C-alpha cells in the first residue's frame, strides 16, 4: 500500500479528512522550503503538494505564477525540487509528498530519468497539470512501476466517462478543481461542489481532494464535509508574498492558518 493510500485509510478510519497544503519549491528562496514543509506537518498537514517552478504555469493564477518567478530567479529546477524533497525525507518518512507541476520539465529530463529520480527522492505522487490520461500512458506506467501514484485533475465539466478513465489510470487520489479558471480565482459555490462530488463518487473508488477557492478555516470546514481532502495553495503563497522581507513572519502566518483549518476540519 502506498503512503497516500495508507494516509487516506488512516484518516477515514479516524473519521477525519486530509489537509493538503501546496507551496512552490524555492519560494521565496530555496532555504525556506524544507523548514516550511516540516512546520506545515506540525500544524496539521496530512499530505504536502510541492510545486515545481515553471516559466509558463498556465493553470495557475497570478499569485502562484509570481511564486514560480521568484523560485526561478533562484535557479530552481525540477532536479533541485527533488533534492529538497530528499532533504525533507531525511527527518520525515511518514508524510506523503506529491510533486505538482507541468510536463515540459519532465520531458526535458526524460520520463525514465524522472521516474527514477522521483523514486530516489521518495515522492509518493505526481500530478502533472497538462498531461491528460489519454497521453500519459508511458510516463504514468513508469511511475506506477516504481510505486508512485499518478494523480489527475477533475474539472466541473468532467464527464462520467472521463471520471472513470481517471479512476482506472490514476491512484492515490483525484484532485477536483472546484472552480472554472485558474488557481486563486473566484468564490467557491459549495452546493455546486457537493452536487459534482456525488457524480464523481459514483464513478471512482479513489479519495477526492478539493482545491481552487479554499481560502480560510470556514471554507476548509465546509469543503471537508464534502470531499476526502482539502487542498490550499494560493492563500498560503499570499502569506509568503506579503512577507518577502520577513520570511519568518510568513512561516508563522502559514502555520496559524493551517492550524485554524485543521481545528475547523476536526470540529
Image (cartoon, rainbow, N blue to C red):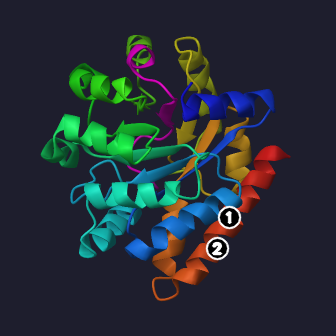
Crowd rating for badge 1 (residues with CA inside 10 Å; few <14, some 14–19, many 20+): some
The residue carrying mark 2 is 253
Residue at x-position 41% and y-position 61%: 84
Does 52 appear above or below 253? above
Q: From mark 2 to mark 1, how far is it between C-alphas?
A: 6 Å
- Report the residue that reaches farthest toward the bottom: 245
The residue lying toward the viewer, choosing from 37 and 176, is: 37
- Locate residue 35 relative to residue 162 in the image: left or right: right
Query: Can see residue 233?
Result: no
- Magenta stretch in the rendered image: 166-185
Cβ–Cβ under 8 Å for marks 2 and 1: yes
Q: Position of residue 176 (x, y in %)?
A: 50, 33
Q: Secondary structure at mark 1?
A: helix
Query: Can see residue 221?
Result: yes
The residue carrying mark 1 is 257
Residue at x-position 25% and y-position 26%: 136
The residue lying toward the viewer, choosing from 46 and 256, is: 46
* Residue 131, image quadrant: top left
The residue lying toward the viewer, choosing from 111 and 245, is: 111
Q: Position of residue 220 (x, y in %)?
A: 68, 48
Q: Secondary structure at mark 2?
A: helix
Amino acid at each position: 500500500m502506498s503512503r497516500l493510500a495508507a494516509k487516506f485509510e488512516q484518516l477515514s478510519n479516524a473519521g477525519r479528512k486530509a489537509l493538503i497544503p501546496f507551496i512552490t519549491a524555492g519560494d521565496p528562496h530555496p532555504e525556506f522550503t524544507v523548514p516550511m514543509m516540516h512546520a506545515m506537518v506540525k500544524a496539521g498537514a496530512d499530505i504536502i503538494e510541492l510545486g515545481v517552478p515553471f516559466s509558463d504555469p498556465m493553470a495557475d493564477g497570478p499569485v502562484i505564477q509570481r511564486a514560480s518567478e521568484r523560485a526561478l530567479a533562484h535557479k530552481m529546477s525540477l532536479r533541485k525540487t527533488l533534492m529538497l524533497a530528499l532533504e525533507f525525507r531525511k527527518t520525515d518518512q511518514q508524510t506523503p509528498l506529491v510533486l505538482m507541476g507541468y510536463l515540459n520539465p519532465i520531458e526535458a529530463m526524460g520520463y525514465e530519468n524522472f521516474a527514477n529520480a522521483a523514486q530516489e527522492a521518495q515522492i509518493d505522487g505526481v500530478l502533472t497539470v497538462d498531461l491528460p490520461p489519454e497521453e500519459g500512458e508511458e510516463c504514468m506506467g513508469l511511475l506506477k512501476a516504481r510505486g508512485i501514484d499518478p494523480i489527475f485533475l477533475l474539472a466541473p465539466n468532467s464527464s462520467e466517462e472521463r471520471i472513470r478513465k481517471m479512476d482506472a489510470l490514476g491512484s492515490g487520489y483525484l484532485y477536483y478543481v472546484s472552480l472554472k479558471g485558474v488557481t486563486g480565482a473566484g468564490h467557491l459555490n459549495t452546493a455546486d461542489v457537493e452536487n459534482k462530488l456525488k457524480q464523481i463518487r459514483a464513478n471512482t473508488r479513489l479519495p477526492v481532494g478539493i482545491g481552487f477557492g479554499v481560502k480560510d478555516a470556514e471554507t476548509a470546514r465546509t469543503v471537508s464535509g464534502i470531499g476526502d481532502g482539502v487542498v490550499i495553495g494560493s492563500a498560503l503563497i499570499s502569506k509568503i508574498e506579503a512577507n518577502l522581507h520577513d520570511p519568518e513572519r510568513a512561516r508563522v502566518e502559514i502555520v496559524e492558518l493551517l492550524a485554524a483549518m485543521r481545528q475547523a476540519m476536526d470540529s
